[in-house]
Amino acid sequence: MKYTPILLFALLFGCGNTTNGDAEFETFSQHFIENLWKQNPGWATSVGYHKYDNILTIPNEENRQKSLTFSTQYLDSLKQFDFEKLSKTHQTDYLILENYLKSNAFYINEFKSFEWDPSGYNFGETLFKIMSNKEAKPAEIIANLNKFLSNTNAYFSAAKQNIKNPTREHTELAIGQLKGTKEMLEIGDIAAFFDTQKSEKTQLLASIKDIDGFLEFLQDQLNKIDAGKIKPRSYSIGKELFTKKFDYEIQSKFTAEEIYNKALSRKKEIQGEMYRYASKLWTKYYPNTPLEKDSMLCVQKVIDAACKSHVNRDQFLAEIERQIPILTEFVTSKNLIDMDPTKPLKVRKEPEWMAGVAGASISSPGPYERNENTYYNVGTLAHYSADEAESFLREYNQYMLQILNIHEAIPGHYVQLIHANKSPSMIQNIMGNGAFIEGWAVYSERMMMEEGWDKNTSINATESSDEMWLFYLKWHLRAACNTILDYSVHCKNISKEDAMNLLVKEAFQQPAEAEGKWRRATLSQVQLCSYFTGYTDIYEFRQGLKNKDKKFNLKEFHNKLLSFGSPPLKYIEKMY
Ligand code: ZN
Ligand code: ZN
């Protein structure tokens, strides 16, 4: 199992040959990736690598020890490379690998979510990915599914042994999500797949029973929590774990606390800017009322009036489709970044198996499926009541919808992922940095506004660009407040009341949206920081380059920035 690259290459290339560092590293990383997939079959399946589709790993102590050994051995193997002699790309791969291996040990030894987060025990998405394997014949897929499902009993037995002090929030989440997976096996996509293939369902039915057993166990945990027989763990993980997780996941040059403080002061600035636009717009919306003196209230009132300008519920998808070519044209004519006409973005109605909540997301092909399409999934509003639809459409009003399209599509996520897929580094594609990916999307919103998108009257019914700025700033404020909320929930144990106050009063969010955000902050850690941290990293990096270089060219900067794949910005700075 242990791979010793130096020894191997000493044999292949002769001794003392140090110039082969890069070639050796390339081979090393290929072997590493192959072993990574062997070690983590579910992860492999999720990125479109189907060799291990029939394996469901049992989450027991033995396998955790194996995973730790994997980390220790590869950390050892890495040391055999002379870091200074590697190319910049390989140095970055090296650092990303090192971070991953250390974080793996951190999650097993310190974070231990396998003890308190039961929602980690769910394979629904993996099953869906196994089923959608385009390279395999239906009979092979059925065989893979059956083999995979033959481990569900052992899988849930190990899960029950692991769970020691679950949080109430993650237990409730686990029950909800697992019911979805059960439904998929009983009457959903997986059941339908077995039906069309006229396949024996013996294993499928046994696995459904296993899921039921685990659901009962989880419900029992909840009952015991309610009866005071189990003291649940708090959803708030505390500053020590949060800080470490932030360092491993976000990989910013700033610490969690530094970013929190930056977000606090940015919040003040944004609120000030919003008030400037709101007071300019006041007489347009409230011609007969004197200017509201309370600045927060003034902003809120202008937002309330201006958000009424939105598309009809049945026009939501059509409007997104209409805007895509206009955004492309703007980006191209303003020379902002290279576009790739051979990889068009396909706007589609959100597939059934996705969350089923209105909204939008990008599905991009993984590193093993580069020829697949990139989809812009748009949630349907069909199941909304008239009031729910109206509230949703006021949020994604005429102005906000443009920012959403910039963020998700052009030049946000879609454009970034097209560029990233051209990066030669497989490591950097597999271990993409969430903060860089979200940071680029958030950065691109501001960049588009700076380059004059707000004055684009081909898309805006109104002559004034002040509304565009007001709503852009509201959106941007959300990113800053995501960070403040995340840090406050986990490091400062903020009360729900104070959190709702922050989101509703200070960030102008609808109570329903704020409620959802609170829930998300109690169920996740660090991820909500990725937007503002990534944005700050990129924006400050760009401003630094601009100040140094009189011939700074925005398009060259963007093309180069995105050419490295999706590593943390602090590594791009070194390669740039
Ligand atoms: Zn309306
Ligand atoms: Zn995003």
Image: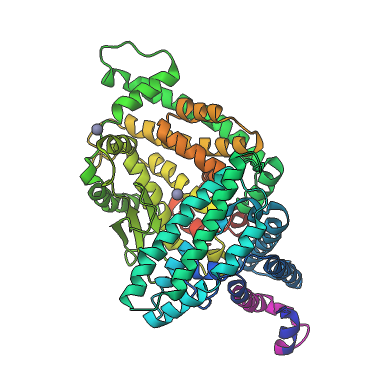
Q: Residue at x 62, y 34 (%)?
A: 261
Q: How many marks?
A: 0
Q: Which residues are magenta?
A: 12-33
Q: Is residue 234 left or right of residue 391?
A: right
> In x, y percent, where is residue 449?
39, 40
Closer to the camera in the image, 437 or 211? 211
Front-lying residue, 150 or 483:
150
As rendered, which of 224 and 5 lies closer to the eye?
224
**Quadrant housing the N terminus:** bottom right
Q: Position of residue 302 (x, y in %)?
A: 34, 23
Residue at the image point whose x is 27% and y is 39% from the top: 385
> Does residue 96 appear in the picture of this structure?
yes
- Magenta stretch: includes residue 447: no
Seen from the viewer's position, the closer of residues 392 and 495 is 495
User: Which SS type dominates the magenta stretch?
Assistant: helix
- In this picture, is 434 found above or below 294? below
- Answer whether residue 22 is magenta in the image: yes
Q: How is the image coloured?
A: rainbow
Q: Position of residue 42 (x, y in %)?
A: 54, 68
Q: Quadrant of ligand 1?
A: top left
Q: Residue at x 67, y 56 (%)?
A: 107
Q: Position of residue 347 (x, y in %)?
A: 29, 57
Q: Is residue 404 above or below residue 363?
A: above
Q: Quadrant of the C terminus?
A: bottom right
Find residue 87 and report its image quarter: bottom right
